[in-house]
Image (tube, rainbow, N blue to C red):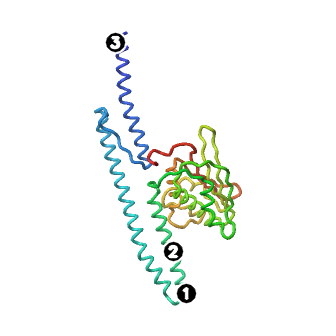
Amino acid sequence: LAIGLLSTASAWIFVRQLNQPLKRLVFAARQLGQGRSVRLPISDTPSEMAEVYRAFNQMAEDVEQAGQERELMLAGVSHDLRTPLTRLRLSLELMTQENELTDGMVRDIEDMDAILDQFLAFIRDGRDEEVEDVDLSDLVREVVAPFNHPTEQIRLCLEPIPPFPLRRVSMKRLLNNLIGNAMHHAGNGIEVAAYVSGDANAPYVVLSVLDRGAGIDPSELEGIFNPFIRGDRARSGKGTGLGLAIVKRIAAMHGGNVELRNRSGGGLEARVRLPLGLMLPRDAV
């Protein structure tokens, strides 16, 4: 009996010592998959897993370095293109002869400048921005005010929401992207709603931008948030296809998510859910 008990206890201890490093590895892999910087400690790791941890840490460093190089390259290209575009636009404005060709060139330059803005916004995702307690209703009113001047184009349906931790500038970018997308595809009949939902144990804030445009084909909904993907067939998409990718990244940075829903009677709802009363992801503060 004693030998059996000792064998069982030894096996349990061995399995536990093996399971803990594996669970830590699984957690770290998920964190890395979400774009967070993570390293596994090797000093207090059993020798059986130390080599695996070293390989994982090396892979994480390689992935981060590749991402930094890609972002640096895109930022450099976007920045360097600004100077010739500005020079071209200035030259066109100084031309005395105004015709349809000149106007078209000015519009093309403006479109290219807007595309570069999207690239830079995607690269600078606001991860370094400070977190502060924000009244979301006031922030929504601040963003919508320019769209409703001089006439109202966006109707607000805001319920009382207690202040909670947000990145102010990033959330304004998220809302501007959703409203701009709705105005481009619908033009009018746009609503912005914000309210608290969920139960007492897991409350969350719902921020919705609703329009009465053409909607999106259900087959496109799954991949519409990927970078450089546009809902061309359903909503005649233009631009870089980064607007919704930026929205998804900002929502994820706040521990939330975003989804698109076709509305009954036509139109689209972009619904963002943000946790209320919960801490942001560890690398967010």
Q: Quadrant of residue 127?
A: bottom left
Mark 2 vs 3, N-terminal side = 3
Which residue is labeled 1 in the image?
A: 99
- Secondary structure under tag 1 reads loop
Q: Which residue is mark 3?
A: 3
Query: Between disc 3 and disc 1, whose residue precedes?
Result: 3
Most extreme residue toward the bottom, as rendered? Answer: 96
Res 150 → quadrant: bottom right
112 or 156: nearer the viewer: 156
Left or right of 123 in this view: 190: right
Residue that appears at 47% across and 80% down:
89
Q: Provide the secondary structure element on which disc 2 rests.
A: helix
Q: Nearer the viewer, mark 1 or mark 2?
A: 2
Rounded to the nearest whole Å, what is the CA distance between mark 1 and mark 2? 17 Å
Determine contact: label 3, label 1, CB under 8 Å: no
Q: Identity of the amino acid at label 1?
A: Asn
Confirm or deny contact between disc 2 and disc 3 (CB under 8 A).
Answer: no
Q: Amino acid at mark 2?
A: Glu
Residue 157 location (% of width, % of height)? 69, 55
Q: What residue did someone put label 2 on?
A: 110
Residue found farthest to the right: 265
The Cα–Cα distance between marks 3 and 1, rounded to whole angstroms, is 97 Å
Counting residues from the start of the chain, the first of labels 1 and 2 encountered is 1
Residue at 57% across / 52% down in the picture?
Answer: 134
Query: Nearer the observer, disc 2 or disc 3?
Result: 2
Q: How many other residues sit within 10 Å of disc 2, few (<14), some (14-19) or many (≥20)?
A: some
Residue 24's spot in the image, x, y percent?
Answer: 39, 37
Looking at the image, which residue sits at the far top?
A: 1
Instruction: Say whether residue 234 is left or right of residue 106.
Output: right
Q: Quadrant of the N terminus?
A: top left
